[in-house]
Image: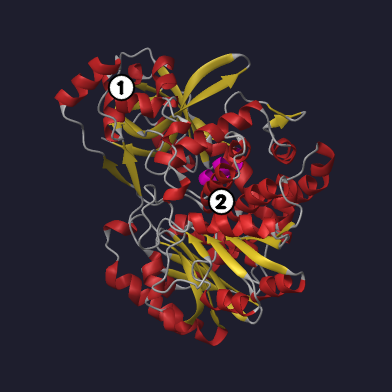
C-alpha cells in the first residue's frame, strides 16, 4: 500500500471565521469550510447554498454562437439534412442525446452518428463524413470532439458539408476551418466560464436556439439531467455554471427519471418501477453507477446504444437498449479485471518497469474499450503517469492518465512527431501511432516525464480540509455539509482528520479480508464511538487491534440500517501516531 501524503489546507484567519459565523449563523467548522471555497459573506453564502438558474450566463457570449444558431436555423428553413455527431463516451453520448433530442422535437430531417471505437477511433472520422455525404447531409454538428479535426473538417468542406464544432478540449495552435466553433478555451472567446463539459456546451447551443426561436424558456431545461450526468462523469470542476447545472439536473432526476435512465438505474440497484429508491442522488452515484454503464455501450458494443437508451420516450422503447447496456457493463467488468491482472504481472516481472517515472504497457490483444480504465487502475496502483496501449486497425491506440499536478498532455505533445494523432487535457489523453514506434515512444515519453515531474508529484496525496474531534460530528453538522453538494473537483466533499483514536475492540476485516471495518473512540474516557470502513486497509487489522493510537483521514457518510440512521467514517487513510 502506497504511503500517502496529507496536505492540510490553510486554516482561515480567525477574524474571517468569526465574521462569517455571525453573518450566516454557522458553526466554526462550517465557516472554515466555506471560506476555503471562496465563500466569505452572507451574499456569497446565499449564492453557494441556493444555486439559481439566474447564475447561468448568456449563451451568446460564446464566440461563434450567433453563427452556429443562424446556420442551424437556415438549415431547417431550407429543409437540409442535419447530422449530430458525438464521441462514444458519457460526455459525447449525452451531448448527442441532448442536441438530437431537442432538434427532433422541432425538425424531422435530423439524425445522429456515434463513431465506432474500434473501426473509427476517437473524434471526427472520415467514415462519419462519408456517411453524412452519402445521406445527403449538408450540416454536421460535432459534440465533445472536433477541435483538432483539421483534416476531417477540410474533407467535409470539400464534400459540401458545413461543420459546427462544440468542444471543450484544449485547442491546438491551428483551428479547424469550421463554419462555427463553440469552445470557451479558444482564443478571443469572452465566455466567462471556461470549464463546461461537451454536453454543457451542447446545452448552451440549445439555450441559444430556444431563445432565437422564441420557445418556452423552460424548454432547454428538459435536458439538464443529461448535463448533470456528463459533468459528473467527465470530472469537470464542480464550480460556477457546472455546479448550477449539476444541482438542477440532479433535482430533475430525483423527481422523474427519463425511461432509459430509470431502467439503467434499476440495473444498478438504485431504482424500482421507474423511480429512485433513495431520496437524493449524488455525484458519486453518477460517477460509479450511471457513468460506467453508459460508457460500457461504446466500450463493448457501440455508443449509439447509449443514445438510443437516453432518447427513448417510453419504458418499452428503453427496455432493449437498457438490457444491452447493463449486459455490456457486466462484460466490461470481466475484461477490465483480466486486463488489470495482466498489466500488473508485466510490471511485477520487469525490474526496469518498476524503477521508471512513468508506465507504458502494450499488448496487442487488450480490449480497446477498457484501456482507459486499465490506465486509471495502474496509475492508482503505482501512482505515476501511465499509458496503456493496444492494437487497433493496424496501429497502436493508447489512453493516458496522469497524477495530480502533472500535465500528461504536455508530455505527450513532446512526442508529437511520433504520433498519428493525439488529444486530451492535463489529466488524461489519448493517442494513436504506428506499431513499430512504440519502443521509441516509450523512451521519449519517459524522458519527457522524468525531466519535469517532481518527487512530490509521485506521492499520492490527500487534501485535508479540517482537523475535528469526534464529538463535533453531529447529524446537524452532516446535514449542513450536504448542503454544499454537488461535490466534485474544486468543491470536493470535505476531508476531515481526527487524532488520538484507538480501536473500541470491535474493529475487524470484512469482505475478502482486504477491507477494514472500524469502530473507534477518541482518547481514553470518551463514550462516543464511531464506525467506519477503510477499503484496502485490511492489512492493518492486527496493528489497529493491538491498541496503538492512530489518526484517520475520512469523509462523512450517512448509514441507514434497519431503520437506524448514523454517521459513518469513509476512511481514506490511517496513520499510526505513536
Residue designated by label 1:
469
Visual colour scheme:
secondary structure
Frontmost residue, 154 versus 521 = 154
Res 468 visible: no
Q: Is residue 403 above or below residue 441?
A: above
Q: Is residue 327 left or right of residue 484?
A: right
Q: Is residue 203 above or below residue 78?
A: above
Q: Which mark is residue 371?
A: none
- Residue 29 part of the magenta segment: no
Res 214 visible: yes
Q: Is residue 138 above or below residue 67?
A: below
Q: Is residue 531 left or right of residue 155?
A: left
Frontmost residue, 260 versus 325 = 260
> In terms of image quadrants, where is residue 187?
bottom left
Q: CA distance from mark 2 to mark 1?
A: 45 Å
Secondary structure beneath disc 2?
A: helix
Frontmost residue, 38 versus 568 = 38
Q: Which residue shows up at 57% across the image and 52% down it?
A: 91
- Near mark 1 (Cα within 10 A), the count class, few <14, some 14-19 or many ≥20, is some
Q: Which residue shows up at 60% across the image and 44% down it?
A: 213
Secondary structure beneath disc 1?
A: loop
Q: Which mark is residue 202?
A: 2
Q: Which residues are magenta?
A: 225-233
> In terms of image quadrants, where is residue 11?
top left
Quarter containing the C terminus? top left
Q: Is residue 323 above or below residue 414?
A: above
Q: Which residue shows up at 28% across the image and 34% down it?
A: 36
Image coords of residue 48 (percent x, y): 37, 29
Image coords of residue 34 (percent x, y): 31, 29
Mark in the foreground, 2 or 1 = 2
Image coords of residue 281 (percent x, y): 58, 31
Amino acid at each position: 500500500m502506497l504511503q500517502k501524503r496529507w496536505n492540510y489546507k490553510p486554516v482561515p484567519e480567525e477574524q474571517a471565521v468569526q465574521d462569517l459565523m455571525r453573518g450566516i449563523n454557522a458553526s466554526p467548522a462550517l465557516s472554515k469550510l466555506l471560506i476555503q471555497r471562496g465563500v466569505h459573506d452572507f451574499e456569497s453564502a446565499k449564492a453557494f447554498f441556493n444555486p439559481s438558474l439566474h447564475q447561468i450566463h448568456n449563451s451568446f457570449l460564446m464566440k461563434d454562437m450567433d453563427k452556429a444558431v443562424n446556420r442551424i436555423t437556415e438549415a431547417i428553413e431550407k429543409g437540409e439534412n442535419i447530422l449530430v455527431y458525438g464521441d462514444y463516451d458519457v460526455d459525447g453520448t449525452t451531448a448527442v442525446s441532448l442536441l438530437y433530442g431537442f432538434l427532433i422535437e422541432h425538425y424531422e430531417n435530423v439524425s445522429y452518428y456515434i463513431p465506432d471505437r474500434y473501426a473509427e477511433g476517437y473524434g471526427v472520422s472520415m467514415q462519419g463524413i462519408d456517411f453524412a455525404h452519402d445521406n445527403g447531409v449538408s450540416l454536421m454538428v460535432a459534440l465533445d470532439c472536433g477541435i483538432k479535426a483539421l483534416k476531417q473538417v477540410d474533407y467535409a468542406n470539400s464534400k459540401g458539408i458545413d461543420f459546427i464544432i462544440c468542444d471543450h478540449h484544449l485547442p491546438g495552435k491551428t483551428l479547424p476551418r469550421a463554419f462555427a466553433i463553440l469552445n470557451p478555451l479558444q482564443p478571443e472567446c469572452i465566455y466567462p466560464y471556461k470549464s463546461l463539459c461537451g454536453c454543457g456546451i451542447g446545452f448552451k447551443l440549445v439555450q441559444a436556439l430556444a431563445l432565437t426561436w422564441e420557445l418556452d424558456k423552460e424548454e432547454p431545461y428538459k435536458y439538464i439531467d443529461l448535463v448533470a450526468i456528463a459533468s459528473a462523469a467527465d470530472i469537470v470542476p464542480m464550480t460556477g455554471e457546472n455546479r448550477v447545472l449539476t444541482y438542477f439536473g440532479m433535482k430533475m432526476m430525483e423527481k422523474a427519471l427519463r425511461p432509459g435512465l430509470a431502467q439503467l438505474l434499476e440495473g444498478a440497484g438504485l431504482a424500482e418501477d421507474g423511480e429512485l429508491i433513495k431520496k437524493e442522488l449524488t455525484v458519486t452515484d453518477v460517477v460509479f453507477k450511471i457513468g460506467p454503464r453508459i460508457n460500457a455501450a461504446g466500450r463493448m458494443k457501440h455508443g449509439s446504444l447509449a443514445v438510443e437508451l437516453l432518447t427513448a420516450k417510453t419504458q418499452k422503447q428503453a427496455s432493449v437498449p437498457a438490457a444491452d447496456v447493463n449486459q455490456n457493463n457486466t462484460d466490461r467488468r470481466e475484461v477490465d479485471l483480466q486486463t488489470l491482472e495482466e498489466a500488473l504481472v508485466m510490471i511485477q516481472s520487469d525490474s526496469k518497469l518498476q524503477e521508471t517515472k512513468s508506465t507504458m504497457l502494450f499488448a496487442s490483444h487488450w480490449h480497446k474499450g477498457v484501456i482507459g480504465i486499465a490506465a486509471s487502475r495502474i496509475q492508482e496502483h503505482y501512482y505515476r503517469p501511465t499509458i496503456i496501449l493496444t492494437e487497433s486497425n493496424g496501429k497502436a491506440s493508447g489512453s493516458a492518465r496522469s497524477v495530480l499536478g502533472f500535465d500528461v498532455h504536455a508530455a505527450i505533445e513532446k512526442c508529437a512527431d511520433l504520433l498519428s494523432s493525439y488529444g486530451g487535457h492535463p489529466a488524461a489523453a489519448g493517442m494513436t501511432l504506428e506499431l513499430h514506434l512504440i519502443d521509441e515512444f516509450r523512451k521519449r515519453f519517459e524522458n519527457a516525464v522524468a525531466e519535469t515531474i517532481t518527487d512530490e508529484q509521485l506521492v499520492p496525496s490527500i487534501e485535508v480540509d479540517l482537523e475535528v474531534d469526534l464529538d463535533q460530528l453531529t447529524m446537524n453538522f452532516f446535514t449542513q455539509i450536504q448542503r454544499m453538494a454537488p461535490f466534485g473537483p474544486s468543491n470536493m466533499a470535505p476531508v476531515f482528520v481526527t487524532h488520538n483514536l484507538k480501536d473500541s475492540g470491535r474493529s475487524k476485516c470484512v469482505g475478502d479480508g482486504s477491507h477494514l471495518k472500524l469502530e473507534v473512540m477518541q482518547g481514553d474516557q470518551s463514550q462516543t464511538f464511531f464506525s467506519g470502513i477503510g477499503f484496502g486497509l485490511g492489512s492493518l487489522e492486527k496493528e489497529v487491534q493491538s491498541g496503538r493510537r492512530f489518526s484517520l483521514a475520512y469523509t462523512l457518510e450517512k448509514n441507514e440500517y434497519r431503520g437506524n440512521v448514523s454517521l459513518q467514517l469513509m476512511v481514506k487513510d490511517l496513520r499510526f501516531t505513536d
